[in-house]
Image (cartoon, rainbow, N blue to C red):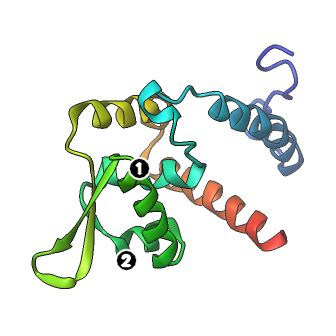
Amino acid sequence: MAKGQDERPADQDGRLTTEDAVRAMLLTMPRLVSRAKRTPVPEQLRRLRLAPRHLSLLSCLLFDGPTPVKDLAARLEVAPTTVSLMVSDLQREGVVQRRQDPGDGRRSIVSLSEDPATREAVDAWLASSAKAWHKVLDGLSPEERATFVHVIQGYEEELAGTS
């Protein structure tokens, strides 16, 4: 079906009933996931067989810069050992670097590779999604953006609690 054909319109005030909103989201989410899965992985990264969790880790490093393993674990909501394993995989392939924190020798700081081609490949992989999110979220007020993010995070939490 073409976009919009399978969704009921909002009422005259632009409001949806909960039932209509649930219906719209149940129809939209599979398409969104399908499109995200079809986002082509740049040639340089294809051989790595990256999972969505790697994409999340790389997103954090791209947006936040060098980050301690413990902080990455907190952002990704996984154990530090899980992050260490992912970082080891990516480090072996030259996608990320791990170095000792000069201020605290017990901490590791992870960053994207300094290789410009690798950084460009990671950026290219994330760019289309980031551009789409910017376009959609720029049209919302700060309060609407906060509500949207809260709703998506709540949805993910509910799914995690029911599995």
* Coordinates of residue 101 in the picture (x, y in percent): 17, 75
**Furthest-left residue in view?**
102
User: Is residue 14 visible from the viewing direction of this image?
Assistant: no
**Furthest-front residue in view?**
92
Q: Residue at x 84, y 35 (%)?
A: 27
Q: Residue at x 33, y 47 (%)?
A: 94
Residue labelled with disc 1: 58
* Coordinates of residue 138 in the picture (x, y in percent): 42, 34
Residue labelled with disc 2: 70
Q: Three-letter amino acid code at disc 1?
A: Leu
Q: Residue at x 88, y 24 (%)?
A: 6
Q: Three-letter amino acid code at disc 2?
A: Lys
Secondary structure beneath label 1:
helix
In the rendered view, would you say 117 is above or below 84?
above
How many numbered marks does the figure carry? Answer: 2
Marks 2 and 1 in Cβ contact (< 8 Å):
no
* Coordinates of residue 154 in the picture (x, y in percent): 66, 64
Q: Residue at x 45, y 72 (%)?
A: 73
* Coordinates of residue 29 in the picture (x, y in percent): 75, 40
The image quadrant of residue 35 is top right
Q: Nearer the viewer, residue 62 or 141?
A: 62
The image quadrant of residue 99 is bottom left
Q: How far, Cα to Cα, is label 2 from label 1?
A: 15 Å
Q: Earlier in the sequence, mark 2 or mark 1?
A: 1
- Within 10 Å of the Cα at label 1, are there few (<14), some (14-19), or many (20+) other Cα atoms? many
Q: Nearer the viewer, residue 156 or 22?
A: 156
